[in-house]
Structure formats: structure tokens, C-alpha cells
Amino acid sequence: MSQVKEVVKKGGLIDSISGVLDFGIDLAEKKNLINNGTANLIKKGKDTILNTVNNGIENTMTSQIESVEKMDNYISNWNEFYKNQDFTSMEKQYRKIEKELQNIMPLENVITKARVVENLHNLIKNNGKNFNLSNEELELANKLI
């Protein structure tokens, strides 16, 4: 999780896009396609838009990371209460897990779809690159995730 946090902090993609746009704006100004005032106005608008996008991405990733970390802690607690056969405490942790699952469901859905693709790909590959899969094989690809 710390690696994901570091990537979110450093960004990179947004900075690259900003650099390309700045290059294009500067070139248009240099070739007298736009004047200096227009170039500055476009750059300020670009910066505002990219900052908003960047903040949205960062906030979403931070929220997802926090939810995963919380859920990991709740799972550890649940396991401990399970060992102690304390169902009341297990139930409290389970409700917390359910709440956090709502926050990370979109991520889970993407992972599930990727696993289905992985299963189908391997079935086709291991079947001599034959795309004629039986209904049973197709059903298994969706269930073995």
C-alpha cells in the first residue's frame, strides 16, 4: 500500500500531459497563432482543469487505500474474535467489513472481470488456441475467480 501511496503522490501522468499542452501552447504563440494574453489564459485554464483532475484521482486512490487498510485490520480482528469464539465481536467487525466493501466494490468488480479474462485466455491457450469452448468451460471460467 505504501508503494501505491507514493505513486499517487508523485503523479507523473498529469505532469506529462501538462508539459505537452504547454509545448503546444508555446508553439502556437511562437508561430503567432495566438497572442501572449491568450496563451497565458489557456495555460491558467489548463492548470485549473489538470489540478482538479489530479485532486480527484488522488482523493479516490487515497480513499480506496484507506478502505483496504481498514478492512485488513477488521479482518484481523474478526479472525482473532473467531479464535476466541466471540460471536458478538465477530459480528461488529463483520459489519465494519461490509461497510468498507461498499467503498472498494468498483475495484473488486474490475479484479473479478480481469480474473474471468485470465481464465478464458488460459482455457483457449491450453485448448490449442481453439475458441470453441463448451458451455461448461465458459461457466467454469466465470465461476473460478
Image (cartoon, rainbow, N blue to C red):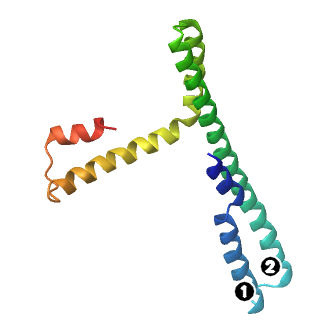
Q: Position of residue 71 (x, y in %)?
A: 59, 30
Image height of 96 relative to 51, above or below: above
Separation of residues labelled 2 and 1 (CA atoms)? 8 Å
Mark 2 vs 1: CB contact within 8 A: yes
Question: Which residue corresponds to the image point at 70% horizontal and 71% vertical from the top-left?
Answer: 18
Quick one: quadrant of the N terminus?
top right
Q: Quadrant of residue 90?
A: top right
Name of the residue lying farthest toward the right: 37
Q: Quadrant of residue 145?
A: top left
Kindly identify which numbered label has been placed on residue 39.
2
Query: Mark 2 belongs to which amino acid?
Result: Ala
User: Neighbour class for label 1 at 10 Å: few (<14), some, many (≥20)?
Assistant: some
Q: Mark 2 or 1 closer to N-term?
A: 1
Question: Which residue corresponds to the image point at 77% horizontal and 87% vertical from the top-left?
Answer: 29
Question: Which residue corresponds to the image point at 15% horizontal and 48% vertical from the top-left?
Answer: 133
Between 30 and 80, the one lying in front of the other is 80
| Left or right: residue 65 compared with residue 85 | right
Name of the residue lying farthest toward the bottom: 31
| Mark 2 secondary-structure assignment | helix
Q: Position of residue 93 (x, y in %)?
A: 59, 18
Q: Position of residue 66 (x, y in %)?
A: 66, 37
Image height of 118 relative to 43, above or below: above
Query: Mark 1 belongs to which amino acid?
Result: Ala
Between 14 and 46, the one lying in front of the other is 14
Question: Which residue corresponds to the image point at 64% horizontal and 65% vertical from the top-left?
Answer: 13
Kindly identify which numbered label has been placed on residue 36.
none
Q: Position of residue 103 (x, y in %)?
A: 59, 33
Image height of 36 relative to 124, above or below: below
| Left or right: residue 38 compared with residue 49 | right
Tag 1 residue: 28
| Mark 1 secondary-structure assignment | helix
